[in-house]
Amino acid sequence: MSQILGRSLLSPSLISYFFQETQSGDLKSTLYHINEIMSRTYTDEDVTYQRKLWCSAQNAGKGYNRLIRDAQQRVENLNHNHSDLPICRREEIPADEHMAHNDFSIIMREDDTVAPSMPAHHVFSSIGVIRSFLEEKFNIDKMFGCDADINAVIHYGKNYSNAFWNSQAIFFGDGDGTVFGPFYNDIDIIAHELAHGFISSQADFDYIYQSGALNESVADVLGIMVKQFVQKETVSQSNWLLGENLFIDKKRAPALRSMKEPGTAYNFTQSNRDPQVGHMNQYRNLPRHIDNGGVHINSGIPNKAFYLLAMELGGYSWDVAGKIWVAAVSDPLVISSATFIQFATATVRAAKRLFGDDIAMKTRQSWLDVGLKLDNI
């Protein structure tokens, strides 16, 4: 069975709309790349990705350190024989194995005290906050499942309008300067991309159909919790918006996603507006060639379920609702091809185990409120 490697922040359709409108060569290049990373695959025979088989002794990197790299608006050298395999895997990576991020020079390391640029400083410090947040609130001390270093590449591609996780590192473009600003300015977006690495070490949701939407949604959940943590916001104080600095036109596009009201984050035209849905009665049953079956669209449904539970519980999102979601992602019974129902059931199971019947009932209700009725556990 093939597994998709890349995880893209933006859907191809969003870039496609702007490309059709502007015929921008930069957006065309971004669109081509997004389609490519969302279809690149590996097979089960290539790598063992089940959570209990991940190994802490990896040649991919020791010490769980931050490494910031500068692409200088270049992309990886396609003439290099890059390894596409996930950075944490059962087999040791051969000494001569070369990964895409190795094409770019390191400009900042873990112990550096002076940053060469503001973008480098922001990404470096943001990763530090995210790393500490995961360890402090969820006891996650290795977000990728092993001791691999945390590689982040900034200034990727010429006016590249996206951020992505390629199974080994996180990459951020500068944006085209017309529609999109830099993709490294929002800590919730940085957390979202790193979350894909964490998800890969746990449930490893297939990046297609409902499991792919869960992959995107869990990354959004971790992203919004980090944003709320940094801003010291309770759930009622938060605006529940992700990516508030991505779009240049703040009037028509305040954010990339709204977990409170999926489908309302941006509205450029009738045909180019936030396509996310927040209830199963709006579910988009899309073919694989459209956004991998709607991974960036239907993810609004579990997003809304998390929002509803967090609001019902009050306080800080990570204290109860977040712990339930993280526990569900780590549940050995949650398979990579999980459906919404299967993941929702895992959240109720986690809620009952961690917090008792009352919280489990509220968790069940949050899913019912987005159109998912669960069997008794």
Image: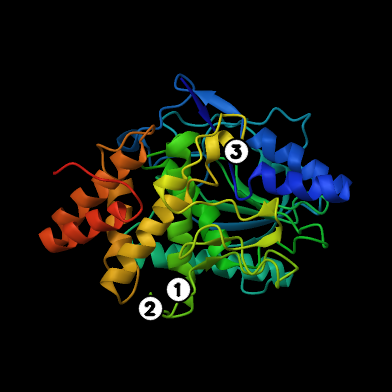
Q: Which mark is residue 228?
A: 1
**Above or below, comparing residue 260 to residue 284 in the picture:** below
What residue did someone put label 2 on? 234
Query: What is the distance, in whole Å, between disc 3 and disc 2 at their CAs?
Result: 33 Å
Q: Depth check: give the residue in front, 254 or 116.
A: 254
**Dot 3 lies on which element?**
helix
Q: Position of residue 34 (x, y in %)?
A: 68, 40
Query: Observer-nearest residue: 280 or 362?
Result: 280
- Would you say the residues marked 2 and 1 are in contact, meaning their CB atoms lie under 8 Å apart? yes
Question: Label 3: how many residues lie within 10 Å, few (<14), some (14-19) or many (20+)?
Answer: many
In the rendered image, residue 148, in percent from the top left (x then y), is placed at 49, 47
Residue type indicated by callout 1: Gln
Q: CA distance from mark 2 to mark 1?
A: 7 Å
- Dot placed on the residue nearer the N-terminal end, 2 or 1: 1
- Do labels 3 and 2 touch, CB within 8 Å? no
Element marked by disc 1: helix
Could you tell whether 165 is left or right of 280 in the image? right
Tell me the residue at 66%/63% (across/down): 184
Q: Which residue is rendered at x = 55% and y = 57% of the image?
A: 263
Question: How many neighbours does mark 2 have within 10 angstroms: few (below 14), some (14-19), or many (20 or more)?
Answer: some
Q: Nearer the viewer, residue 230 or 315?
A: 315
Three-letter amino acid code at disc 2? Thr
Q: How is the image coloured?
A: rainbow
Report the residue marked by disc 3. 291
Position of residue 276 measured from the top left corner of the image (x, y, whole percent): 54, 52
Q: Earlier in the sequence, mark 3 or mark 1?
A: 1
Q: Is residue 276 above or below residue 320?
A: above
At x 26%, y 45%, the residue is 373
Answer few, some or many: residues within 10 Å of disc 1's Cα (few below 14, many 20 plus, some between 14 and 19). Answer: many
Tell me where residue 236 sits by quadrant.
bottom left
Label 3 to label 1: alpha-carbon separation:
28 Å
